[in-house]
Amino acid sequence: MKKKIAFICVHNSCRSQIAEALGKHLAFDKYDFYSAGTETKPQINQDAVRLMKELYGIDMEKTQHSKTFDKIPTPDIAISMGCDVGCPFIGRSFDDNWGLTDPTGHSDELFIEVIKQIENYIRNL
């Protein structure tokens, strides 16, 4: 049985969604991937959606949506995307904190840098 990995952000609209999509794309055979937040947004960050389509051909809006932590299976491993926007409380400590900058509202270059950091972390799981 594959371990369940959850990527957690406050709003579950950008970094955690990218991590879920890349996890499913790059390591679907090793783990089951989920993302969640302590709050939700009406849609996934549109810059993240656009760049993930351009870089990997992944349409996150087809398979993912913003959801809270209680809407996913209990993970074996919970990873925080970074507490620069406030660390969410999920009822347990995180197994890892990737400390990623939130690229929301910034340049495509910063988005791509964060996406590549997430890719590297996933390849090293």
Image (cartoon, rainbow, N blue to C red):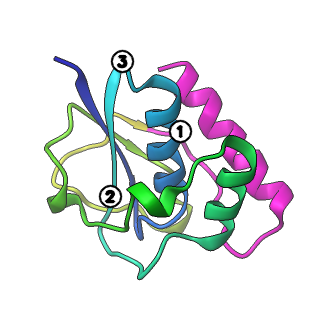
Question: Furthest-bottom residue in view?
Answer: 42
Q: Is residue 93 above or below residue 110?
A: above
**In the rendering, at what x and y percent does residue 103 appear?**
69, 63
- For mark 3, give the secondary structure: loop
Frontmost of labels 2 and 3 is: 3
Q: Residue at x 33, y 25 (%)?
A: 31
**Looking at the image, do the residues carrying marks 3 and 1 touch, with CB atoms under 8 Å apart?**
no
Frontmost of labels 1 and 2 is: 1
Q: Amino acid at mark 2?
A: Ala
Name the disc covering residue 22, or none: 1
Q: Residue at x 48, y 67 (%)?
A: 13
For marks 3 and 1, give the CA distance: 13 Å
Q: Is residue 120 above or below residue 43?
A: above
Q: Residue at x 55, y 55 (%)?
A: 59
Residue identifier under label 2 = 36
Q: Left or right of 118: which side holds 1?
A: left
- For mark 1, give the secondary structure: helix
Q: Left or right of 65: which side holds 104?
A: right
Q: Quadrant of residue 69?
A: bottom left
Please tell me whether residue 117 belongs to the stretch shown in magenta: yes
Name the disc covering residue 30, or none: 3
Quick check: can you spot residue 102? Answer: no
For mark 2, does the 10 Å Cα neighbourhood hold few (<14), some (14 to 19), or many (20 or more) residues? Answer: many
